[in-house]
Image (cartoon, grey):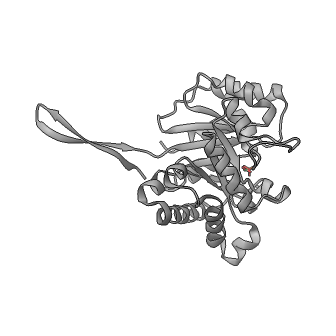
Amino acid sequence: MPYILSTQAMDGFYGTFYKTTIAMRKQIAAANWKMNGTYQQAESLLNEILQAKIALKPFQEVIFAVPFPYLIMSNSVVANEYHYHISAQNCYHKASGAFTGEVSAEMLRSIGIRYCVIGHSERREYFGEDNALLAGKADLCLKNEITPLFCCGEPLAVRESGNQNQYVADQIEASLFHLNKEDFSRVIIAYEPIWAIGTGKTAAAEQAQEMHSFIRSTLKKKYGEETAAATPILYGGSVKANNAAELFACEDVDGGLVGGASLAADDFIEIVKALKG
Ligand code: PGA
């Protein structure tokens, strides 16, 4: 839903009138490559997508969450592309120190990375990341001027028991609600029901809209109408070229976080084109 960005008094031939600027909140197609592809494949995939020269509106963005070793190359490939950004897929929850093999938010910042996925369900499941640890990652990202792309979403058993709203609200509250309004306004949320990730089972558009609208109302209670209306909430979980338009058309779905289908240029290009315009 469009929200009012500013109302400005203007003097003109017909006297003073008010010019109201209506802005769309950001609509984002984010690719999550996970642990796939070689450096060479990554470079050609990026180039192929850029060569499509998709006409993006000022409020539309494309983000590629690429493996750590490809961040610098990827950032230089999109350097002159205004609407394209590179994201890390993770960072560590401590600032620095003896944590062999880990990558800090400060390191990402130092190579010009401004986005980082945190709390992906695969990190929660396979690496034991919990809500409290993710709060630390959110803080470190924001401190380093990195936008956290915060993932939340319920497992199948929770959906079947009907408790998905409370489950997702708890994840968001525990990891993000300690942030002040200004910091929170830099966060992107991705709702990814675990039962839909990599399974080919997409949430129905109505299920996605229902949850996104619930998330937005949860944000509104904490941060107020304006912040809630401006926060991009992406849907993730088996987004494909043939279902993206229906999902993205939902009022509170502001684009998608796409795994499998982001690895094929043609598919991802169609998904980007499906963003709300
Ligand atoms: P998928 O993955 O599109 O392959 O379901 C989404 C994600 O895990 O971000």
**Residue at (50% x, 44% y) in the render:** 26
In the depicted structure, whether residue 21 falls above or below residue 55: below
Q: Is residue 174 left or right of residue 101?
A: left
Residue 266 image position (x, y, % from top left): 69, 34
Q: Nearer the viewer, residue 258 or 103?
A: 103
Number of numbered markers: 0
Q: Is residue 5 left or right of residue 120?
A: left
Q: Nearer the viewer, residue 150 or 246?
A: 150
**Residue at (58% x, 47% y) in the render:** 255
Which residue extends farthest right?
A: 100
In the depicted structure, whether residue 1 falls above or below residue 77: below
**The image quarter in which residue 196 lies:** bottom right
Residue 213 image position (x, y, % from top left): 52, 63
**The image quarter in which residue 151 lies:** bottom right
**Residue at (68% x, 27% y) in the render:** 75
In the depicted structure, whether residue 239 falls above or below residue 54: below
Q: Is residue 264 left or right of residue 233?
A: right
